[in-house]
Each structure stands twice: as structure tokens, then as C-alpha cells.
């Protein structure tokens, strides 16, 4: 059982749950002055949305482990559970089970919202993960951008479907419409933060995994351009992320979100720490530490959504 929880990346799943809950209860509901499940998504719909997202994410992790059996034998010897704790055919079965569960949960969720066409979001997400593992993962930057996009989607999808649910409730929709611009901007800030930090981390992980990827023909940015050029890309994107974080602080100051304004000083400091660490890094162990630091940064950004609630 412990091996299974490791296989499905239970800490990452927990982060997904926290992220989606904070997006709804920390940002969307307070900004729109709504009580939990009073309007928009009800409890059943929200749980189905979380379930569909979770199942599809787990399927993605399993597919990634299948693809990385050879590179992981060099990059992370003994860490990949495929072929050790679980046979390859079992992982393949688990992948299809979780993919089908995710699409079914997403389809039923869409049915409850009154638009089965919304299920395409879940089908396309599952398809994108499949293409990522089979084709994009070993293409320079493309695979990194796919992972970053899906990270941002974890936040954006909650607002997207909350909006769709509100659109089915005309009286409520009209009453909360004046607050949409602020909700849009806050969700853009947090999903943008998730995108850019995830992108930096994926490039750093490629530098960390350079040896195995190079040996088995995985043409990541670090393999194609070299570790030094990949590092410069990561540093450039980190500088851009820091500038965007500072710009967000200016916005928080103008709308008098004091808690977020001060908390983002920590975010700024973490970006600076990442930048300095990247400038000095050259070994796989150093890139691994930076990857861990970026994960702390990502979690800090996610938790900062709770501070929006305190501003109201």
C-alpha cells in the first residue's frame, strides 16, 4: 500500500486538492461575495471536479514512470517503482483505469452542469498527457510548457467551471458580474505564478537528469542546447517571474490587499534565492536542491491564495 501511494505521488495529489480548494474558497467565493456552495458549483460538482482532475493527474504520473524506466535507471537508480514493486503491465492497466475514471467523472460533472460538451476539457487534458509522455516530453521546451500549462490549469479550471455554473443561474450571475474583473485578474496572477514556477522547475529537472536523458536519446533543452544554455534560460525566466511578482505586489498595494503585499516579499526573496543558486549550480545534486527550493516556492504561492480570504 505504501508503494502504491508513492507510485501515485500522494504529496502532489495533496497539493492539487489544496490548490483547487484554495482557488474556490480562498479566491473565487470571497471576491464574488458568495458563501460556500451557495451559488456556482455545489458540493457534489466540486468533488467531481477534484476527482476528475486527480484521476487524470495520477494517470499522467503513471505514464511518466513508464516512459522514464530507462532514463531513471541512470538519473534516479532504485527510485522508479515500475518493474520493481509493480510489473509494467500492471502500471499500464492502472493508467487506463485512472484515465477512464477521470474522463467519466469529468463527463458526469459536465452533465450535472447541463453541458456535456464541457467533458472535452477532461478528454483533451488526458490526451495532452498522453502526447506529452509519448512525444513532447523529449522535445526541447515543448514538454516543459505542457507541464507548466497543466499546472496552471489546476487553478484556472476551478474559475472556468465556476463561471460556467454561475452562467446557468442568471439572477446570481447578474449580481456578481461587477466582481468578475477582479476575479479574472487574481486567478490570472495565481495561475500565471503556477505556470512560470513550474516551467522553471521543469527546466531545472532536465538539467538534473541530463546524463540519463542524453544516454537514452531524450532531447530535452539541456541535452540539445547544453546545460549552460539551459541554465541561462532558467535564469532569464526566473528574472521575468520576479518582475511579474513585483508587478503583482503593486496591484495588491493599490487594491489594499496588505496581507498579500507583505507575503509576496517572501516570494520575491525565494525567486532571488533561486536565481543566485542557479548562477552557482553545475552538478546534478545542486540542481536537485534548486528543484526542491522551487517546490517550496510553488507551495508558498499556492498557500498565498488563502490570504485573499483575509482581505474581505
Image (cartoon, rainbow, N blue to C red):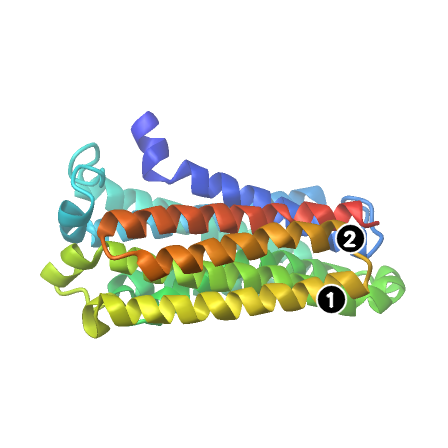
Q: Nearer the viewer, residue 282 or 6?
A: 282
- Name the residue tied to disc 1: 251
For residue 125, what is the image quadrant? bottom left
Label 1: state its secondary structure. helix
Figure disc tally: 2
From the top left corner, tell me how far across and down residue 215 is, in percent. 10, 60
Q: Residue furthest top?
A: 1
**Eyeballing the image, is 200 above or below 108?**
below
Residue 111 visible in the displayed image: yes
In this orientation, does residue 160 appear? no
Reply above or below: 279 against 287. Answer: below
Q: Position of residue 50 (x, y in %)?
A: 56, 46
Q: Residues within 10 Å of mark 1 (few under 14, many from 20)?
A: some
Answer with left or right where residue 53 lies relative to residue 86: right
**Vertical comparison of 259 with 143: above or below:** above
Nearer to me, 257 or 29: 257
| Label 2 Cα neighbours within 10 Å, binned few <14 / some 14-19 / many ≥20 | some
Which residue corresponds to the image point at 79% horizontal and 51% vertical from the top-left? Answer: 30
Residue 32, position as x, y percentages in the image: 81, 57
- Label whose residue precedes the other's in the sequence (2 or 1): 1
Who is closer to the viewer here, 214 or 266?
A: 266
Element type at mark 2: helix
Mark 2 touching mark 1, by CB under 8 A? no
Residue at point 64% right, 49% down?
304
Q: Is residue 62 left or right of residue 297?
A: left
Question: In what quadrant of the picture does the N terminus appear?
Answer: top left
Q: Which circle marks residue 258 in the picture?
A: 2
Give percent across and percent down for residue 152. Answer: 53, 61
Tell me if 137 is positioned left or right of 9 in this view. Answer: left
Residue 173 found in image quarter = bottom right
Q: Quadrant of residue 43?
A: top right
Amino acid at each position: 500500500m505504501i508503494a502504491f501511494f508513492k507510485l501515485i505521488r500522494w504529496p502532489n495529489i495533496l497539493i492539487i486538492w489544496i490548490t483547487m480548494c484554495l482557488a474556490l474558497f480562498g479566491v473565487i467565493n470571497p471576491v464574488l461575495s458568495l458563501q460556500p456552495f451557495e451559488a456556482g458549483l455545489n458540493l457534489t460538482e466540486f468533488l467531481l471536479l477534484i476527482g476528475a482532475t486527480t484521476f487524470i493527474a495520477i494517470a499522467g504520473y503513471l505514464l511518466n514512470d513508464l516512459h522514464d524506466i530507462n532514463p531513471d535507471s541512470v538519473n534516479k537508480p532504485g527510485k522508479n517503482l515500475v518493474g520493481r514493486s509493480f510489473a509494467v503491465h500492471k502500471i499500464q492497466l492502472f493508467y487506463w483505469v485512472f484515465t477512464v475514471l477521470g474522463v467519466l467523472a469529468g463527463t458526469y460533472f459536465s452533465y450535472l452542469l447541463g453541458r456535456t460538451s464541457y467533458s472535452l476539457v477532461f478528454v483533451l487534458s488526458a490526451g495532452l498527457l498522453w502526447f506529452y509522455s509519448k512525444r513532447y516530453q523529449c522535445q526541447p521546451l515543448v514538454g516543459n510548457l505542457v507541464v507548466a500549462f497543466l499546472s496552471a490549469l489546476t487553478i484556472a479550471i476551478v474559475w472556468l467551471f465556476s463561471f460556467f455554473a454561475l452562467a446557468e443561474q442568471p439572477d446570481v450571475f447578474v449580481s456578481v458580474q461587477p466582481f468578475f474583473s477582479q476575479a479574472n485578474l487574481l486567478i490570472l496572477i495565481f495561475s500565471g505564478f503556477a505556470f512560470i514556477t513550474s516551467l522553471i522547475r521543469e527546466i531545472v529537472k532536465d538539467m538534473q537528469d541530463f546524463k540519463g536523458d542524453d544516454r537514452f536519446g531524450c532531447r530535452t533543452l539541456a541535452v540539445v542546447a547544453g546545460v549552460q544554455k539551459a541554465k541561462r534560460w532558467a535564469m532569464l525566466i526566473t528574472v521575468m517571474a520576479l518582475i511579474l511578482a513585483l508587478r503583482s505586489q503593486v496591484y495588491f498595494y493599490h487594491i489594499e490587499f496588505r496581507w498579500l503585499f507583505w507575503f509576496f516579499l517572501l516570494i520575491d526573496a525565494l525567486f532571488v534565492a533561486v536565481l543566485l543558486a542557479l548562477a552557482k549550480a553545475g552538478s546534478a545534486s545542486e540542481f536537485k536542491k534548486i528543484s526542491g527550493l522551487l517546490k517550496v516556492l510553488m507551495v508558498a504561492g499556492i498557500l498565498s491564495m488563502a490570504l485573499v480570504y483575509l482581505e474581505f
